[in-house]
Amino acid sequence: MTPSWRRVRAWLDARLEPMAPPMIMLIGVLLLGLLALVHYAIGYEISFAVFYTIPISLVAWYAGRRAAYFISVLSAVAWHLANRLAGETFSVPAIPYWNAATRLGFFLIISTLLASLKETLAREQALSRTDLLTGLNNRRAFLEAAQQEFLRAGRQKLPLTLAYIDLDNFKMVNDGEGHEVGDQLLQMVAEVLRSQLRATDQLARLGGDEFALILIDADEEYAKTVIERIQAALLAAMQARDWPVTLSVGVLVCSRLPENLQAMIAMADELMYAAKQGGRNRAVFRRFQE
């Protein structure tokens, strides 16, 4: 992909990705209408096949398969009408309808290929951002989400809380009872964490036995309440399986934000290690308000 095409693609993504499919379809219909008028004005002797693929491709990529099929049908009809109104004639009356059908088939193939490619890319992107064991966001997805929330909190002057979580004694269970049991433990931890958070909060498995969460618009009092709920719920789940696993948590509560996200992460990481060095099974809080 050339740099110029990347810029075009980035420009289109920035404007069309946030739009709802009906709005994309409307744009496609308007483009198609303009194209049909130009086609009619120029005449039927010049082929417009490549130009009709423009609205079809846009709709297939940004609005999905069904919308693209609808635009494909409209495109075949528009081409047929533009040619007939421009005075195109045939020796056999059925020929223009045959041509319209073949054009429709061509448009449907393009729609299917592009929509399938977009769906495949979306699945691959989701997999690249998901921890396959727990279904949580992975480190990459978490850092992207954290950066967005960091910038949003800065713009709106909102408090933001970042917690780093490490499982105490996980290695004992993982080595002693086997990796399959260790995987079950991690899945259970993920479910416990997920159950205690709001839909707007961010949660991820960073790797190994480390997790991280961001509490959106959360002050210290709320952060302590959430962490206490998580610790109690996890302790109950671990005791039910007779697993000696607890949490060491470093919690950074920011009423004002640090210089950048990296500084915020470094402080939360230090707090988590302070919790482990302080005896484990505890949470260490710090309020950042410089």
Image: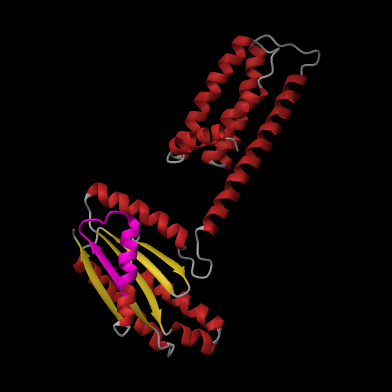
In the rendered view, tell whether residue 189 sits above or below residue 87: below
Q: Is residue 257 magenta?
A: yes
Q: Position of residue 83 (x, y in %)?
A: 66, 15
Q: Nearer the viewer, residue 131 or 90?
A: 131
Q: Nearer the viewer, residue 19 or 283?
A: 283
Residue segment shown in magenta: 249-271
Q: Quadrant of residue 48?
A: top right
Q: Position of residue 263 (x, y in %)?
A: 32, 59
Q: Is residue 200 magenta?
A: no
Q: What residue do we see at 33% from left, 74% from top?
A: 272
Q: Position of residue 93 (x, y in %)?
A: 77, 16
In the rendered view, tell whether residue 63 sits above or below residue 166: above
Going by the picture, which residue comes out furthest to the right? 91
Q: What residue do we see at 27% from left, 52% from top?
A: 153
Q: What residue do we see at 81% from left, 13% from top?
A: 91
Please give left or right for residue 194 compared with residue 154 in the image. right
Q: Position of residue 113 (x, y in %)?
A: 66, 41
Q: Quadrant of residue 230?
A: bottom left
